Amino acid sequence: GRHQSIARDNHMNRRVRALFLTTTLWAMAWALVGVLAGIVQWQFFPYEGLSALRYLSRYVATYVVFLGATGALCGVGFGLLLGGAERERSLAQLSTKRMALWGALAGAVMPLLGLLGVATTIGAEGTPPLVVAIVVGASALMGAGAAAGSLSAARKVELLPRRDASRLSAT
């Protein structure tokens, strides 16, 4: 009856909050990489038409927005993938390696879909395979790191019990 409805609503609210938090954290992580990418571009590829500060701010802003949005999409993908594939397990039951694998998959799939969309729009020859491999590989590594880092952070702040804690307390 009413109590089941409230429990179901609370469960759904928790899932939505977790997805929002995951999306936000992944967007922030990718945006930080965007800051670094903008600085690298500014340092190694100087532009003659703008002052150094305007050039730096323009490229950093571009990379932050683009990579932040990519990270948000990867975070949503990860949250949905994890929620669907690991529905029967709690986060406390998942190993860091398993989380990293789900994160790598989500981190690779979203940019791959985006690059495939670009390739079909401008033609297959528009995106060199090496660029696809670098972008997808880097995003997969970032996804693995973000997923493993999220689990580690949750355990450190004691939101979740450590996976090995049950074995230690049994001895």
Image (cartoon, rainbow, N blue to C red):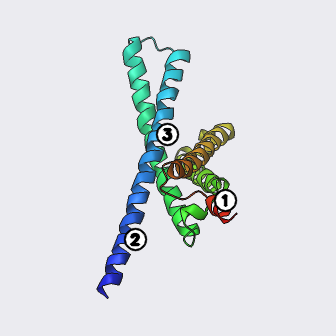
- In the displayed structure, would residue 24 be above or below residue 78? above
In this view of the protein, can residue 114 be seen by the observer?
Answer: no
Residue 131: name its quadrant.
Answer: top right
- Give the crowd class for mark 1: few <14, some 14-19, many >=20 residues within 10 Å: few
Q: Distance between the residues labelled 3 and 2?
A: 29 Å
Residue 19: % across, % down? 43, 58
Q: Which mark is residue 54?
A: none
* Left or right of residue 54: residue 128: right
**What residue is pinned by disc 1?**
168
Looking at this view, is 138 or 48 the one in front?
Answer: 138
Where does the C terminus fall, quadrant-wise? bottom right
Crowd tier of the residue under label 3, counting other residues whose Cα lies within 10 Å: few below 14, some 14–19, many 20 or above? many
Residue on which disc 2 sits = 11
In front here: 88 or 119? 88
Q: Name which of mark 3 and mark 1 comes first in the sequence.
A: 3
Q: Whole-percent x and y of residue 140?
A: 62, 46
Which amino acid, by three-letter code, is at mark 1? Leu
Residue at the spot 63% in from the left edge and 53% down from the top edge: 96
**Whole-percent x and y of residue 47?**
47, 14
Q: Which residue is drawn at 63% across and 52% down?
A: 100
Above or below 58: residue 157: below
In the picture, the disc for residue 30 is 3
Q: Quadrant of the N terminus?
A: bottom left
Work out whether mark 2 precedes mark 1 in sequence or the reverse, and give the earlier one. 2
Which residue is rendered at x = 57% and y = 49% of the image?
Answer: 107
Q: Which amino acid does label 3 sit on?
A: Trp
